[in-house]
Amino acid sequence: MFPELTVMIVEEEATLRELVEGLGRNYLYAFDKGVIGVTVNGKRLWPSAVLKKGDKVVIYPIITGG
């Protein structure tokens, strides 16, 4: 249901939110709801952060239990 682990290298400058949005509706929904984590070069950034060509982006599901 939610996106699985994704590792990618940025090819064009964009904001973090634009990059996630470009991956599809499921990624954007999960990103907005906080059920996936996103790191850029090993750091968490704001959605408005501008990514540069060559940055490494890791998108991972956040597992929770009850």
Image (tube, rainbow, N blue to C red):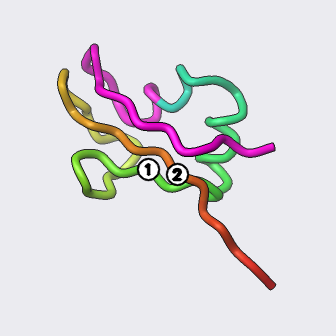
Task: State the residue position of label 1.
Answer: 38
Q: Amino acid at mark 1?
A: Val
Q: Name the quadrant of the N terminus.
A: top right
Front-most of residues 13 and 1: 1
Residue 57 in the image: above or below residue 53: below
Q: Label 2 neighbourhood size at 10 Å, few (<14), some (14-19), many (20+)?
A: some
Asked which quadrant contains residue 34, the reply is: bottom right
Secondary element at image label 2: strand
Numbered circle sitting on residue 5: none
Q: Which residues are magenta?
A: 1-19
In space, the residues marked 1 and 2 are separated at their CA atoms by: 6 Å
Which residue is at 46% across, 35% downward? 17
Relative image position of residue 28 (x, y in whole percent): 62, 36
Residue 25 falls left or right of residue 16 = right
The mark nearer the N terminus, 1 or 2, is: 1
Callouts 1 and 2 close, C-beta under 8 Å: yes
Residue 8 in the image: above or below residue 38: above
Q: Amino acid at mark 2?
A: Tyr
Q: Name the quadrant of the C terminus.
A: bottom right
Task: State the residue position of label 2.
Answer: 60
Residue at the top extreme, as displayed:
12
Relative image position of residue 30 (x, y in whole percent): 67, 46
Secondary element at image label 1: strand
Which residue is at 56% across, 24% downward? 23
Residue 34 in the image: above or below residue 21: below
Residue 8 falls left or right of residue 31 = left
Asked which quadrant contains residue 48, the reply is: top left
In the rendered image, residue 40 lying in the magenta stretch gets the answer no
Relative image position of residue 61 (x, y in whole percent): 60, 55
Relative image position of residue 24 (x, y in whole percent): 64, 23
Which residue is at 25% across, 55% downward? 42
Front of the two marks 1 and 2: 2
